[in-house]
């Protein structure tokens, strides 16, 4: 029934949920199809050694204005040590909380991101960080894909995950890397009236612009993900998967995981400012995330406070949530979820929360069709 191969309109979402709960442990080291199936192994990022990004004009579309000068003047220089230490402590706390929930946690080794580098066409004063594996990597079934990122400074910081990728490869994972982007000037839009900061010069995407719903993925175009990037991933995954590009209302779009988050089959949390109703979610119960609880003067180098909804599901009833996001905890509890509260505000400063800092490498259960069928 779940596979719905004959084109029969799938059963109700709540009966799906019951079927899925008994999924078996996958036989392969890498296997994850959804954002909510029972989590068995996860990568948690690390901030130590991180440096301010090296400025490029396309960042203007997504980065908070207060960061523009900082990135222009301090690209390649370490972040303030006290902020890094506080955030790393919270990342360690997340790792412990997940281990206590029975999940295997793997971490990248500490890396030094200060080294400058270049290509024949451009140079960067340094890298960035290995705190946000979700930007670099997406697991779809037994395949782990490295994304072709449009930020020049991030071309090598994902190398911090290579030892992990090689070890998954040794255990039979399919490992794909998108074509290395050239990131020459042609990729970057120059007109004031361009809708996006990047052109279609070559395929680029950040993996965090995709959400997984079994055999369907939902993607957004953004200032770091272009249509050819989405097409590349669709073609690489093959006919067994379908990538749907949805419209969102986010002039600063960069990463879909503070815009919508599926918590269980049929349960979708959305950003009230950004979500545009979509037929794909016909039959789903949609709730709006409450306003973030973060104080307005909290330092945010990379993103908006909406990372309050950037959460990680341990299974379809259990969500890791920031300890001080009380309205969110209330909403989730009322919706039937168990919350695992973890302190994470210092990580917010660096551009993400629980979803961004993780990659779920293995979740129990297999593929499935969860979205309404649209043509
Ligand atoms: O709301 O600024 C954050 C997403 C981070 N991966 C935002 C997007």
Image (cartoon, rainbow, N blue to C red):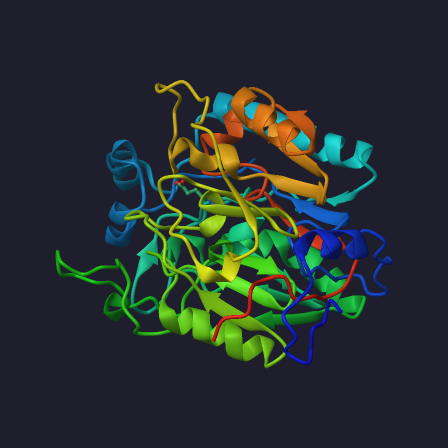
Q: Is residue 283 visible?
A: yes
Picture residue at 35% right of the left edge, 48% below the top: 125
* Residue closer to the observer: 22 or 198: 22
Give the quadrant of residue 313: top right
Assign ligand 1 to one image quadrant.
Answer: top left
Q: Measuring from the top left, give residue 323's x and y in whole percent.
A: 60, 22
Position of 66 compared to 85: left or right? left
* Residue closer to the observer: 236 or 73: 236
Q: Give the answer, above or below, for where 202 lies relative to 98.
A: below
* Residue closer to the observer: 368 or 304: 368
Position of 126 compared to 358: left or right? left
For the N terminus, give its image quadrant.
bottom right
Q: How many marks?
A: 0
Q: Give the answer, above or below, for where 131 lies relative to 185.
A: above
Residue at the extreme left of the image, as rendered: 192
* Residue closer to the observer: 216 or 48: 216
Picture residue at 45% right of the left edge, 51% below the top: 256
Give the quadrant of residue 291: top left
Q: Measuring from the top left, give residue 28's x and y in whole percent.
A: 82, 65
Q: Is residue 364 visible?
A: no
Position of 195 compared to 114: left or right? left
Q: Measuring from the top left, give residue 17's x and y in whole percent.
A: 74, 52
């Amino acid at each position: 029934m779940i596979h719905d191969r004959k084109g029969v309109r799938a059963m109700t979402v709540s009966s799906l949920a019951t079927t899925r709960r008994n999924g078996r442990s996958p036989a392969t080291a890498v296997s994850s199809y959804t954002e909510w199936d029972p989590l068995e192994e996860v990568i948690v990022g690390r901030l130590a050694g991180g440096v301010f990004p090296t400025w490029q004009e396309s960042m203007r579309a997504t980065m908070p204005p207060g960061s523009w000068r900082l990135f222009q003047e301090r690209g390649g220089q370490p972040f303030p040590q006290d902020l890094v230490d506080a955030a790393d402590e919270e990342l360690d706390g997340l790792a412990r909380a997940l281990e206590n929930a029975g999940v295997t946690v793997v971490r990248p080794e500490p890396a030094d991101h200060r080294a400058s580098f270049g290509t024949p066409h451009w140079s960067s004063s340094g890298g960035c960080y290995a705190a946000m594996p979700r930007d670099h990597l997406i697991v779809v079934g037994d395949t782990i894909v490295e994304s072709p990122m449009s930020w020049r400074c991030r071309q090598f910081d994902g190398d911090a995950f290579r030892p992990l990728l090689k070890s998954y490869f040794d255990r039979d994972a399919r490992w794909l890397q998108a074509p290395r982007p050239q990131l020459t000037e042609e990729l970057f839009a120059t007109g004031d009236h361009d809708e996006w900061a990047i052109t279609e010069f070559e395929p680029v995407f950040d993996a965090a612009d995709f959400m997984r719903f079994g055999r369907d993925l939902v993607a957004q175009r953004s200032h770091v993900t272009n249509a050819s990037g989405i097409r590349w991933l669709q073609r690489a995954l093959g006919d067994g998967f379908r990538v749907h590009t949805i419209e969102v209302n986010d002039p600063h779009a960069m990463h879909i995981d503070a815009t919508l988050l599926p918590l269980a089959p049929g349960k979708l949390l959305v950003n009230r400012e950004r979500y545009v109703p979509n037929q794909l979610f016909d039959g789903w119960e949609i709730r709006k995330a409450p306003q973030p609880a973060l104080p307005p003067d909290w330092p945010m180098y990379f993103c908006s406070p909406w990372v309050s909804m950037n959460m990680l599901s341990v299974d379809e009833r259990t969500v890791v949530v920031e300890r001080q996001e009380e309205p969110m905890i209330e909403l989730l509890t009322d919706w039937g979820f168990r919350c695992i509260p973890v302190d994470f505000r210092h990580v917010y400063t660096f551009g993400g929360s629980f979803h961004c800092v993780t990659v779920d490498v293995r979740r129990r259960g297999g593929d499935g069709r969860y979205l309404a069928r649209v043509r």
